[in-house]
Amino acid sequence: EFRERSEKEAQEFRERSEKEAQEFRERSEKEAQEFRERSEKEMKESRERSEREMKEFRERMDRSSRETDRRIGDLSNRFGELAEHMVAPSIAEKFNALGYHFDDISEPRKLKDKQGRVIAEIDILLENDDYIVAVEVKAKAKEQDIGDHIARIEILRAHKDRRNDKRKIRGALAGAIFPQSVKDAALKAGLYVIEQSGDTVKIDVPESFKPKEW
């Protein structure tokens, strides 16, 4: 009876231990699974929050950049308009001193194609019976302005050719601020350089300068 009782108690102990061990394993696996799910959820929420904050930051930066570009553009336009008003009143006089004798000044002049679309705009045009000088006015002249203005003059040349206007065209670049490197490049390209000088402007014509003609 003692052996039977002992074996029974041992069997019950083993069964109880196995049951408790099984419950412990199940509970541990459940807690581990809940921990993994909670961690994945928190990581996902963290990623989504970070992505959302980064997106909002980029949008704010884009808006700020666009606003800055707009303000710079507005400021540049105002400087450009100011420069035009400084250049226009005395520019004919300065060119006439070089022997041109211009009698017609127009600003600005829009060139249109046959469909009426604007294909180019010249800030100031000086004209007489023999020559046309197309002047581009910038607050601060850049090297890119040289190529852009030459392209504009070529459009003007084609525009005049269609009207059988054979007058020679020359170009000039005017700037309130004119870096020396840009000035040298403009002269090398055959463009007159018009610089601010006090309340008026001056045309710098080196001895070696030869204006390009279109």
Image (spheres, rainbow, N blue to C red):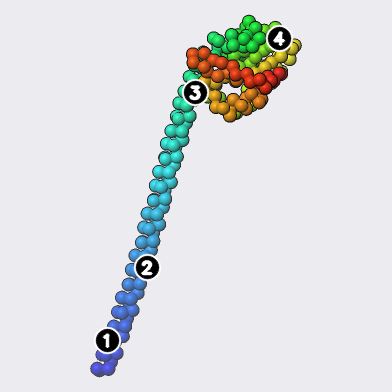
User: Helix, strand or loop at disc 4?
Assistant: loop
Amino acid, disc 1: Glu
Most extreme residue toward the left is 2
- The reply to whether callout 4 and callout 3 are in contact (CB within 8 Å) is no
Is there a contact, CB below 8 Å, between mark 4 and mark 2?
Answer: no
Q: CA distance from mark 4 to mark 2?
A: 97 Å
Q: Is residue 13 left or right of residue 41?
A: left
Residue found at x 73% / y 15%: 161
Pointer 1 with pointer 3, Cβ within 8 A: no
**Distance between mark 3 and mark 2 Cα atoms:** 69 Å
First-in-chain label (1 vs 2) = 1
Q: Amino acid at mark 4?
A: Asp
Tell me the SS state at disc 2: helix
Question: What residue sits 42% from the left and 40% below the top?
Answer: 57
Q: Which residue is mark 1?
A: 9
Residue situated furthest top in the rendering: 103
Disc 4 or disc 2, which is closer to the eye?
A: 4
Question: Which numbered mark, 1 or 3, is in the foreground of this view?
Answer: 3
Q: Mark 3 belongs to which amino acid?
A: Ser
Image coordinates of residue 73 in percent, x first then y, are 49, 25
The image quadrant that residue 147 belongs to is top right
The amino acid at mark 2 is Glu
Mark 3 or 2 closer to N-term? Answer: 2
Judging by the rendered image, the residue that carries numbered circle 2 is 29
